[in-house]
Image: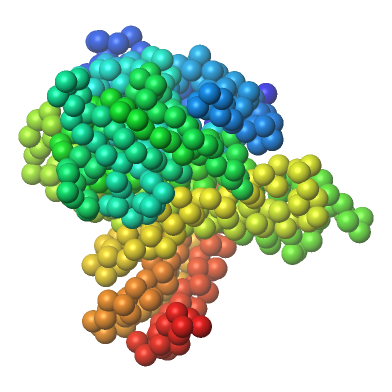
Amino acid sequence: MANFFLDNKDFLYHLSHPLMKKIVEMRERGFADKDKYDYAPIDHEDAIENYKQVLTILGEICGDIIALNAESVDHEGPKVVNDRVVYAAGTQENHDALAKAGLYGISLPRQYGGLNCPLTCFVMSNEMVSRADVGFENIWGLQDCAETLNEFASEEIKQEYLTKVCMEAATCAMDLTEPDAGSDLQAVMLKAHWDEEQQTWLLNGVKRFITNGDGEISLVLARSEEGTTDARGLSMFVYDKKHSATKVRRIENKMGIKGSPTCELVFTNAPAKLVGDRKMGLIKYVMALMNAARLGIGAQSTGLSEAAYREALKYANERKQFGKAIIEFPAVYELLANMRAKLHASRAMLYETTRFVEIYKTYEAIAKERKLEPEERAELKAYSKLADGFTPLLKLMTSEYCNQVAYDSLQIHGGSGYMKDYPIERLYRDARITNIYEGTTQLQVVAAIRHVTTGTFLAKMKEYEAMEYCPEVSHLQKLQSEIIEKYSKAVEAVTSKNDNEYIDFHARRLVEMAGHIILGYLLMIQAAEDDNYRLSAEIYVKTSVAEVEKSYKYIMDSDPEDMDAFKMIKNA
């Protein structure tokens, strides 16, 4: 029997992180639920044990059911029957197993039937499910929609819909994009109008590229204000599939994540309820939803990297050439070591970012219950800024590494990996979407660059630089300090030109430089816990030095006029 929680000691490391004490205390509100619910923890140690038990159950389902169904689901895929989605048999089995175990609503409050686990645990669940089957994680992970309702919806809506997620394992979808509104969501034109006779909002229009589009509960971005064409005319609505007012026009035939139904939907007088305030749909609610989704893609990318690395390691130990296992060859074991370093770095960044998001989100929730103390308000502001900067950086770095690790894993498999006989063929196809959806890598750069120019990343680097590290990685501190200096000079060289187009031209280089440095420090912190982390830190930092040096040299040898050669592509 396989268990994707118990066979990965990294999870225990992150559950024992020093900030978890604060997170658990805040999440449990001083363990106030202990007298209301018999499954609520009584103290920190009890809470951690509870979380471990939940994750152990989920890890077993991932290893023994979801992972075993992944190949058949990839082959069968979902289909449309009578305008509705019918999951592949394995997908339905996965869902039923998780529902029977009572795991839906894992992070929702107990008052709605949830388990009230911290965001850290939900992210771990996303990572484990992704390792088992990335496509199915798109169904499981869309519980983010319920989190958005919990944060912004009325108590009436929460009682109705959060209870459905927790008690009935209702699946979710976020219906944002349209045929003419992809990344540019302010161009959304699906119409919402108030019907006086029925006393409800009615939705009409088309949505496209909707993940799990036929889910029971959908958050829909729609134009509620007549005569508008921008973000100020958009509101958020919740639609219940029970009304049968939508049709699935088709399921997209995708390269990968085949088990995840990506739908084109037609809404015809679909009754819906307004979430929060009118006109705030894109400005406030979708932004929160997208940030949560990007955290989910970080988990998805890390889980897939874990799967691809394990497949490569297994094959390299089993495959023999010239009388010995190919793992004995330097070209192979170097590749594997670099893959593991990227995997460890991705996971370190994933949970660092999750902690930042969790603390500021919890403070926001507490602020609705009582007035925050000055120190708490200051912490909310600080962690909010870190979360805002780290979230796009996480999505960028982990999804790019996911693609690199899958690529290298297939390379280790050689010709066999190109065949459908090995899981890596599927993993390689699944990986490609991670740096595209929920905002391409290029859009993550757009979101992250202001944290380069305003100094958010540099300030955090300096905090990491001032920390004490174990003796085994002390020699890496000097290397890290040197590339911080080069990063700082590169930022100054670009921003001093006072040319926004020039900043955009070098934005990816600057953001990735920041990413390399930050991930290096996170691995150095973990190095005190385990030799494997120390080796990954060694490999990652030395590789990062070369990457930062390359970008530094390019930037320092550059000038705004150099962009002219690239601009000529428009006329080529």
* Closest to the observer, 207 or 496: 207
* Closest to the observer, 82 or 6: 82
* Residue at the extreme right: 323
Quadrant of image for the N terminus: top right
Q: Quadrant of residue 75?
A: top right
Residue 502 rendering spot, x and y as whole percentages:
33, 80
Residue 256 rendering spot, x and y as whole percentages:
60, 45
Q: Is residue 36 visible?
A: yes
Q: Quadrant of residue 273?
A: top left
Residue 80 versus residue 292 in the image, above or below:
above
Q: Locate residue 491 relative to residue 415 in the image: left or right.
A: left
Snapshot colouring: rainbow
Q: Is residue 128 visible?
A: no
Q: Locate residue 240 relative to residue 343 in the image: left or right.
A: left
Residue at point 16%, 38% (across, down): 278
Residue 271 versus residue 495 in the image, above or below:
above
Residue 509 rendering spot, x and y as whole percentages:
42, 72
Residue at point 43%, 66% (across, down): 512
Residue 387 rendering spot, x and y as whole percentages:
30, 50
Residue 452 versus residue 348 in the image, above or below:
below
Q: How many marks?
A: 0
Q: Locate residue 312 relative to residue 146 in the image: left or right.
A: right
* Closest to the observer, 262 or 303: 262
Residue at point 52%, 58% (across, down): 400
Residue at point 20%, 40% (across, down): 224
